[in-house]
Image (tube, grey):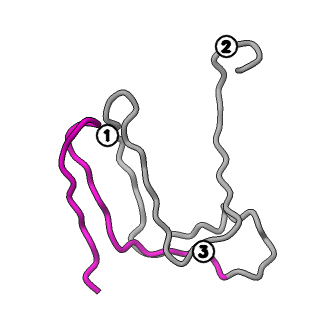
Amino acid sequence: CSECKKHQNASKKLELWSFPEILIIDLERFVCEQINTFVDFPIRGLDLSLYVANKTGTETAPIYDMYAVSCHSDSSSGGNYTAYALNA
């Protein structure tokens, strides 16, 4: 807390006003050490309707399919990247 300088439980809120045709999501997986928590992400049909801030009903539903994944291995100071992509 910036007022009392004590640690407090916090929550994050994510809302998007509009959605692009192609959405890129970058997950930062390093804090002081690598985070190895499994991330479950659908390959088809990621529905982001719950995060729409502009609920006028004029936009199509923000539903995305995964086309590629880039994976980093080793540490935050160096390592290797492996890419996996859909050959469509």
Q: Quadrant of residue 17?
A: bottom right
Q: Secondary structure at mark 1?
A: loop
| Residue at 28% in and 77% down | 86
Left or right: 54 with respect to 38? Answer: right
* Magenta residue span: 60-88
Residue 6 as seen in the image, left or right of residue 29:
right
Where is residue 31 drawn, in percent x and y? 40, 32
Look at mark 1 in the image and give the residue it sits on: 36
Is most of the magenta stretch helix, strand or loop? Answer: strand
First of labels 1, 2 by sequence position: 2
Dot 2, crowdedness within 10 Å: few (<14), some or many (≥20)? few
User: Residue at point 23% right, 63% down?
Assistant: 83
Residue 37 vertical position relative to residue 45 in the rendered view, above or below: above
Task: Give how far apart the Cα atoms at labels 1 and 2 are.
Answer: 28 Å
Q: How many marks are shown on the rendered structure?
A: 3
Q: Position of residue 81 (x, y in %)?
A: 21, 54
Magenta span has 72?
yes
Q: Which comes before the other along the chain, label 3 or label 2?
A: 2
> Label 2 is placed on what type of residue?
Lys
Judging from the image, what secondary structure is the residue with disc 3 in?
loop
Q: x and y percent of residue 47 in the render?
A: 56, 70
Residue bearing the label numbered 3: 62
**Mark 2 sits on what residue?**
6
